[in-house]
Image (tube, grey):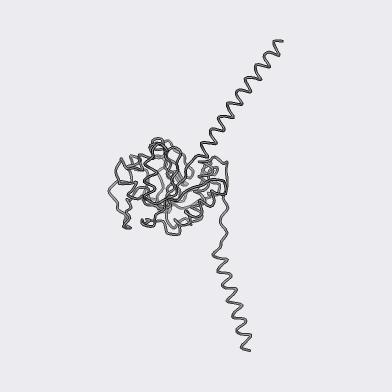
Amino acid sequence: MRKMYLQNKFYKMSTVLMFIALLSLIHICEAEESKNIYIYYDSSYRNSWLSITDSDTIVKFVPETLAKYGISCETVDAKRLAEIVSHLEDAPNTIILMSMDVAPDTIWTGAPDSPIQLWIEAGGTLIWTGDWEFYYVGFSNYTNVHQPYIENIVFGMITVTAFADNTEVKPTELGRKIMPSFESYRTDRPTYASIAETFDCEIYGLSDDGLYAEPVLIKVGKGAIVKICMTGGDVDSNTRAILICEFILNRVFNMGGVKIERPFPVIPIAIGVVIAVATVALIVYFIRRR
């Protein structure tokens, strides 16, 4: 009888624990599904290193790719971006992807109390690509202005080097899990690995000598800044967009190693069609001349 009693008690406890675990899983899934993703793009402002093609690829490729996994995102201009970062209570469930590599004056003034810094510290996640984050303040008259040392304000110290151009970074074990398409690329503004490690961070790529880290996630307050492909033309637009998508899917939404296929090369095919048509036209022309 005692054995049956213990078995029943164990069964009830197991059932309760399984129920609690299920509720926790549902809560986690709901939290992940409730993430708000915004892509910043505003043609009234200009880039630094990123080309128009780089920005356009992010704006087009990322939403289309995420939609295949049931994830929606919204492209916003500088004015709308300011509204988003003003809601600090929503920051922990919000990701902002910068498709342009200069922060607009609506969120970044170069001062410690800039709206974007307060938003990150409140729990927001900012994904940055291209030139050194927060190096410039962008204005809608199509100018970018640098103020001395403003690039160090958000982190409170220098984290990036401007003296390691063309540094090759390769994936860490964590990097291969989060960004399966990441093989290697060359960066111009990598983060000092030793400095990144003074923060709560996740290093997805390292240089061979271990000095420089990228891609990298660095915690700031309750939020984080994620740096991917901190370069201009050294990384093609599709690779940049693919790595960003994989980070969002596998790190933000914890989808477990999703690998994004490269888009079909439409331009070479179009060129091939034009060449084929021109060739046929020439053949017809010479046949008729006979």
Q: Position of residue 174 (x, y in %)?
A: 52, 41
How many numbered circles are shown? Answer: 0
Residue positioned 61% across, 85% down in the render:
286
Left or right, residue 8 beside residue 105 = right
| Residue occupying image coordinates x 68% and y 13% | 5
Toward the viewer: 214 or 255?
255
Report x, y in % for residue 71.
53, 45
Direction bottom: furthest residue:
290
- Left of 31 or right of it: where is 223? left
Residue 233 drawn above or below residue 159: below
Between 211 and 28, which is closer to the camera in this rendering? 28
Residue 11 horizontal side relative to residue 23, left or right: right
Q: In the rendered view of the protein, which quadrant contains the N terminus?
A: top right
Given residues 271 and 158, the one toward you in this image is: 271
Residue 89's x, y, as percent? Answer: 40, 36
Quarter-wise, where is residue 25 in the image?
Answer: top right
List x then y, in percent, for residue 13.
62, 20
Furthest residue in direction left, as rendered: 148
Would residue 274 be found to the left or right of residue 45 on screen? Answer: right
Q: Which corner quadrant holds the C terminus?
A: bottom right
* Residue displayed at 47% across by 41% down: 203
